[in-house]
Image (tube, rainbow, N blue to C red):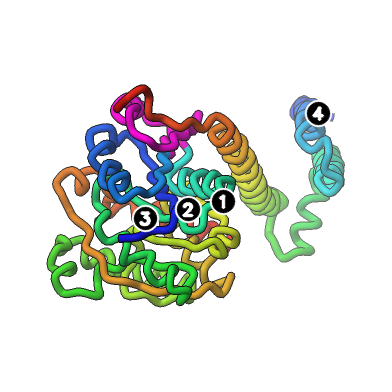
Amino acid sequence: MSIPSQIYVIVPCFNEKAVLRQTILPLIDLQLKVIVVDDSSTDLPKETIEDLPIFYLRHAINLGQGAALQTGMDFAKQQDADIVIHFDSDGQHPAHQISELIQPILDGKCDVVLGSRFLQKESIQNIPFKKQILLKLARWVNGIITGLWLSDAHNGFRALNKEALGKIRLTENRMAHATEILSLIKKANLRVKEIPVTISYTEYSMQKGQSIWNAVNILFDLFKKRWL
Amino acid sequence: MTLIQLLLIVGIILLWRLYAKVFKNQFLGKIVFVLLFLSGIVGVIFPDLSTTIANFLGVGRGTDLFTYLMALIFYASFYFLYAKIEQVESYQTEIIRKLAIRDAEFLQKEQK
């Protein structure tokens, strides 16, 4: 795969030491530039990645995933990035699908590409049933709040071109950023495309991932943002 | 003047000093609290006045009117404090972000 040089993968991480290294290695193999934003992890993940050719940024206090992504994007802008990719540190996102993710941007067909779990039968079967129901609900909430109707709720696997990078500025520090980014896309009139991706649900990621109850927190953040 | 009236007036004056500090730089906040302060003092000295006003507004007793107003003031204060905390949080985020970017490092120590 031939990839232009100014592609940065932002990997926000919070206490993911156990899997961080194996998440990053395939990205380096793809010759992508990696920005790890350590959101003040207490498990000192830097030790495990010190020998890798990556950028390492650390928040002095824990701010949340949204804040970490924005820090990564600010840094990428400074580095004159052409494309940035959001990539989870827990190993859920498929590194081998990055080339498909950025292809529509390279073709100049859109500004933002989002990974979707619901465009392919195999990837749907991959999702635990409880999660499927939650995602369907979240998809509706997103559609109603942002006006952007997608096939999936957010899974965090996205690519943004330079224009999108300039226009999107996340202010939701915690998990509500994933919906915020959709409304920013809509407001800035950016061209969006969804591509099918397969997200892996390992025991590790299920344990660390968003619980159903956390959805209530996210809803509150969104409600607050819009009406308070 | 009864003892309770005296105690309430002293309390209001003490509170006034606190609010004056909180709203040091906000013109509207100051106006609101001058009004609250004055009406508090007047209400303590002429307790029947509150009932007259309450009746005029369609509320039975002055105490009830007071309760409703307190609830409103409580929610308003909560809202303003919440907004303030949000604002401070966003400043904090900017500072932490700037520091993180300033101190960004490229890893890969003597390997190969």
Disc 4 to disc 3, how far (Cα)? 40 Å
Disc 2 to disc 3, how far (Cα)? 38 Å
Q: Which residue is mark 1?
A: A80
Chain for disc number 4: B
- Viewer-proximal residue among B60 and A44: A44
Q: Which residue is mark 3?
A: A216
The reply to whether residue B49 is visible in this rendering is yes
Numbered range of the magenta stretch: A37-62
Q: What main secondary structure does the magenta stretch of the protein show? A: loop
For mark 4, give the secondary structure: helix
Disc 2 to disc 1, how far (Cα)? 7 Å
Q: Is residue A49 magenta?
A: yes
Q: Which quarter shows the N terminus of chain A?
A: bottom left
Q: Which mark is residue B17?
A: 4
Foreground mark, 4 or 2, reads 2
Looking at the rendered structure, the kind of residue marked 4 is Arg
Q: Are marks 1 and 4 on the same chain?
A: no
Check if mark 4's residue and mark 3's residue have beta carbons within 8 Å.
Answer: no
Mark 3 burial class by Cα count in 10 Å: few <14, some 14-19, many 20+: few
Mark 1 burial class by Cα count in 10 Å: few <14, some 14-19, many 20+: few
For mark 3, give the secondary structure: helix
- Viewer-proximal residue among A60 and B102: B102
Q: Is residue A2 above or below residue A110?
A: above
Looking at the rendered structure, the kind of residue marked 1 is Asp
> Reading the chain from its start, which is encountered first: label 2 or label 1?
2
Q: Which residue is mark 2?
A: A6
